[in-house]
Amino acid sequence: MTTRTDLELIHLVKDYGQSLAVAGIDLKIAAGSYCCLLGPSGCGKTSTLRMIAGHEEPTEGSVVLGGREITHLSPAERGTAMMFQSYALFPHLSVLDNVAFSERMKGRPRAEREARAAELLRLVHMEAYAQRLPAALSGGQQQRVALARALMLKPQVLLLDEPLSALDPFLRVKMRAELKRWHRELGMSFVHVTHSQEEAMALADLVVVMNQGRIEQAGSARDVFERPRTEFVARFIGAHNIIETPAGKVAVRCDRLNLVVPDVGEPAVTVAAIEYQGAQVQVHLVAEAARTPNGPDSDDPDRDDPSRWVAVLGDTAFHAAPFEPGQRVAMRWWAQDAHGLMA
Ligand SMILES: Nc1ncnc2c1ncn2[C@@H]1O[C@H](COP(=O)(O)OP(=O)(O)OP(=O)(O)O)[C@@H](O)[C@H]1O
């Protein structure tokens, strides 16, 4: 059922001529969801966001918000608001005037627009900074102001383009919690572009994994993590092994891979390295053929190598029956932990 503020992308295409950035995607984002568009650089996530925002004209397809076609409306008329990567605050305007700017353009009386701007600054805990210029704010503070400014448009959908990428790692985790809180308090849909699977997992109700202009998989974070549909998704989400079996390729989570002493004639792999991580131990494995003359090649950091796997074992289980580098082991898993991958 379509509710008042569901956002729908219908066969959306963006062809820049020299590159097909978005290759015909269909997606429905339920009202009030936190959706993350996730994928590597160049997969088309920003182009998708910009088409939703009205900053980019689709080559084909439509954007529908709450049953209303908004594909060709101007950014201000669509019911969406965009928070940019660089925050894009006006440097010569105070924080309060930055937030009130869109209402000033609409000719809203000064007292009214300033009262609303002050209310939004309270929401983002920035009321004490109302008279400062943006240059006198930290990255996290500028971001809060950018959010307040976007909310001034009373959007049904807030669009966020890599909102945490300019922040240092500590602040990033802090702002992640803030985003989650704002989303809960505001009750509107958020569509957030990121290349960080950790960020998408932490925030999204709906994770949309994109690759080369297409949606590889869309679902809850748990669904995507527990049942990756393609090799690309399993690799991009991480913490999975891709294993060739007679029935085709499967993904098995690193913490669901069991290691045993091989039976006679059973295919085996070699322990390349052991990495202690406190509560768990990572056992790095290579195909027997991948051994170098001087022993297992454990230095190659290429995690995408198809003949490399990782088993994550609990420390208690590992110490009870430890493995050594160079040892031959067999990899086993339960049938329900192997997810067949589409080619
Ligand atoms: N204005 C443009 N003109 C021509 N090609 C473009 C334009 N904008 C993006 N592209 C190309 O379209 C493809 C998708 O770009 P887009 O910015 O949507 O990807 P992205 O997933 O957001 O990447 P990033 O994470 O690096 O921002 C890329 O190949 C890019 O080079």
Image (cartoon, rainbow, N blue to C red):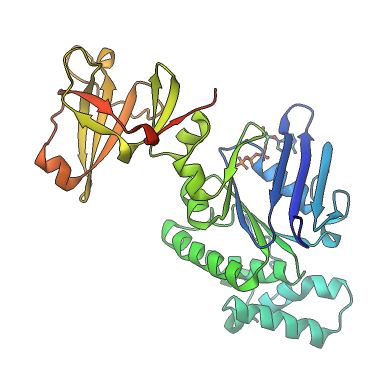
In the image, residue 254 above or below residue 166: above
Measured from the top left, where is residue 208 in percent x and y?
A: 60, 44
208 or 263: nearer the eye? 263
Name the side, left or right, on which 48 lies relative to 313: right
Q: Quadrant of ligand 1?
A: top right
In the image, residue 160 above or below residue 287: below
Measured from the top left, where is residue 72 in percent x and y?
A: 88, 49
Q: Residue furthest left?
A: 320
Q: Can the viewer see residue 209?
A: no
Name the residue rendered at 23%, 24% in the picture. Answer: 330
Q: Can the viewer see residue 325?
A: yes
Name the side, left or right, on which 234 lies relative to 161: left
The image quadrant that residue 180 belongs to is: bottom right
Name the residue rendered at 54%, 70% in the picture. Answer: 181
Name the side, left or right, on which 136 lies relative to 170: right
In the image, residue 69 above or below residue 288: below
